[in-house]
Image: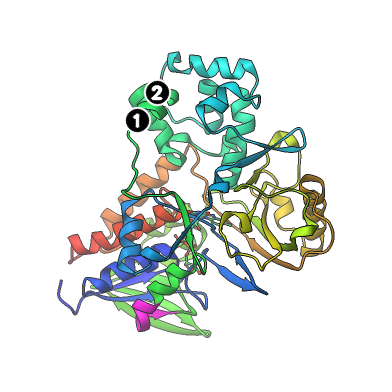
């Protein structure tokens, strides 16, 4: 591509930053607009009185080649810190008590967590007929059909709350958990798929990780490389296509016009739908994305002295099944997950409230939220007294839910891109909300420019 052609990336979260960096490092002219005064989007690490707090995502997984390539590129490869072995222990609340979830086949079949009828049912799962390939089923009906009600209630329901802040009826299995859909289609069974299916395990991969200074290390490194190409405090409000793309943005209340040959949109669904675009079909289709359900979620980070907490916090954290009728979705044992996250003699917890299970709780004012969470922590983990630190973050529209209608949105976005040369849309709006998916999406966006330098 000639050096004079320019790409404008809109959105400075991990998706947009990755796309911009890939283009920049390939010698392309690129500029990035970010509405906020910092980069990283949902990635937000803060140091609070010696506690390292993640107010958005907490962990990255070593399951995508693009993540490994990006980290190597940024020189962050050897700065990873891995989750301690204690994190293999995952608690589920059962009858009001945190109980370790059986994760190995032996503990699943011979431990007492699940009823004998559920364990027997698992043995019969390979004999349940697979659904036709074009079936679009919710997680609820899929899991109930293949695994039964108890696994739905005590494994999948809390897992879906912990990953998507969703309930099983909210998500279509083929869009939200495509691997499960493939297992059924390719192996006719989840049990057979888990035992015999191919797994992507990158060489030397050790699983879940972060960095000494938290996940913010990635956006910071990307911003350092991109330098003056990033314009923070600059919100894109409109796009117009003439010979070239013309973006209108606002900075300090002043309008700003920027011309580019290619536009890469790396925005959350609501923000995508808010951008005005000349050309009716484009506008209509983009505003569809604003209708993607994404409930509010409150995150409360709390630090305590070790002697204030009775529970050993010997695990990744605890998830709460809906059936248990509690006011929190779960809690991460943050200072157990990675070392060095709390001052000596102290521990930290990150608690999640709301999601589509209880959206009304997420938006409660902080004093009420704090009272509610401290009540739950006292009952569930024996936490006593005032926290040394507390930090609240409200995500008004957290993670998009891929419903049974999601295929229509994917088709609309595909059609939109082929109709409007030089416009590409990435990020969680389409498929994949995990950081690894977003990094891969950033690679994909940049790849489209590199493959078709003229749009
Ligand atoms: C509480 C929480 C916990 C999570 N936990 C995990 C986890 O442990 N592991 C994991 O893998 N994933 C996790 N996720 C999901 C993951 O963090 C997100 O899916 C991912 O960070 C999204 O990145 P993104 O760049 O696509 O979007 P965002 O991070 O939302 O970035 C989009 C950027 O666009 C900017 N913007 C918006 N409108 C405009 C505009 N008009 N003009 C210019 N800029 C604009 C925004 O300010 C923002 O910076 C979690 C998310 C949350 C909120």
Please tell me which residue is depicted at 74% across the width and 48% down the height of the picture: 311
Residue matched to label 2: 192
Relative to 395, is 172 above or below? above
Whether the magenta-drawn stretch holds residue 227 is answered as yes
C-alpha distance separating marks 1 and 2? 7 Å
Whether the magenta-drawn stretch holds residue 154 is answered as no
Residue 285 location (% of width, % of height) = 41, 53
Proximity of marks 1 and 2: CB atoms separated by less than 8 Å:
yes
Quadrant, the C terminus? bottom left
Report the side of 447 relative to 34 (left or right): left
Report the side of 151 relative to 328 (left or right): left
Q: Which residues are magenta?
A: 224-231
| Nearer-the-camera pick, 152 or 343 | 343
Q: Is residue 241 visible?
A: yes
Report the side of 243 relative to 336 (left or right): left
Could you tell me which secondary element the residue under label 2 belongs to? helix
Please tell me which residue is depicted at 35% across the width and 37% down the height of the picture: 199
Residue matched to label 1: 197
Task: Single out the residue that lies furthest toward the right.
Answer: 385
């Amino acid at each position: 591509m000639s050096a004079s052609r320019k790409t404008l990336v809109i959105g400075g979260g991990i998706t947009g930053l990755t796309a911009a960096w890939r283009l920049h490092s390939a010698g392309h002219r690129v500029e990035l607009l970010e509405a906020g005064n910092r980069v990283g989007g949902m990635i937000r690490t803060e140091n609070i009185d010696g506690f390292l707090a993640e107010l958005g995502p907490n962990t990255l997984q070593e399951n995508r080649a693009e993540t490994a390539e990006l980290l190597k590129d940024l020189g962050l490869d050897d700065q990873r810190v891995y989750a301690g072995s204690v994190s293999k222990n995952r608690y589920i609340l059962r009858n009001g008590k945190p109980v370790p979830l059986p994760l190995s086949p032996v503990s699943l079949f011979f431990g007492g967590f699940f009823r004998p009828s559920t364990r027997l049912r698992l043995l019969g799962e390979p004999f349940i007929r697979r659904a036709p390939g074009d079936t679009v089923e919710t997680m609820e009906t899929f899991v109930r059909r293949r695994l039964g009600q108890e696994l739905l209630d005590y494994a999948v329901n809390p897992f879906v709350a912990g990953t998507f802040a969703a309930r099983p009826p909210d998500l279509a299995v083929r869009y939200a958990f495509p691997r499960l859909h493939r297992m059924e289609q390719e192996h006719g069974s989840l049990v057979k798929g888990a035992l015999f299916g191919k797994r992507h395990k990158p060489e030397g991969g050790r699983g879940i990780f972060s960095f000494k200074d938290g996940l913010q290390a990635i956006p910071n490194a990307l911003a350092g490389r991109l330098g003056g190409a990033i314009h923070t405090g600059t919100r894109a409000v409109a796009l117009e296509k003439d010979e070239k793309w013309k973006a209108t943005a606002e900075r300090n209340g002043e309008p700003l016009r920027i011309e580019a040959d290619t536009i890469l949109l790396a925005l959350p669904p609501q923000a995508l739908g808010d951008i005005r675009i000349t050309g009716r079909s484009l506008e209509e289709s983009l505003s569809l994305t604003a209708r993607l359900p994404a409930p509010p979620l409150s995150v409360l980070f709390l630090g305590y002295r070790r002697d204030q907490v009775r529970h050993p916090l010997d695990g990744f954290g605890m998830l709460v099944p809906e059936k248990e009728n509690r006011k929190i979705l779960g809690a991460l044992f943050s200072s157990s997950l990675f070392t060095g996250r709390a001052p000596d003699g102290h521990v930290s917890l990150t608690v999640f409230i709301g999601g589509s299970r209880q959206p009304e709780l997420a938006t409660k004012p902080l004093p009420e939220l704090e009272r509610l969470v401290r009540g739950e922590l006292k009952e569930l983990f024996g936490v006593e007294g005032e926290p040394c630190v507390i930090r609240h973050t409200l995500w008004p529209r957290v993670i998009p839910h891929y419903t049974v209608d999601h295929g229509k949105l994917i088709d609309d976005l595909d059609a939109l891109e082929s109709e409007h040369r030089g416009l590409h849309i990435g990020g969680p709006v389409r498929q994949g909300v995990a950081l690894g998916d977003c990094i891969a999406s950033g690679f994909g966006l940049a790849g489209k420019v590199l493959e078709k330098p003229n749009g």
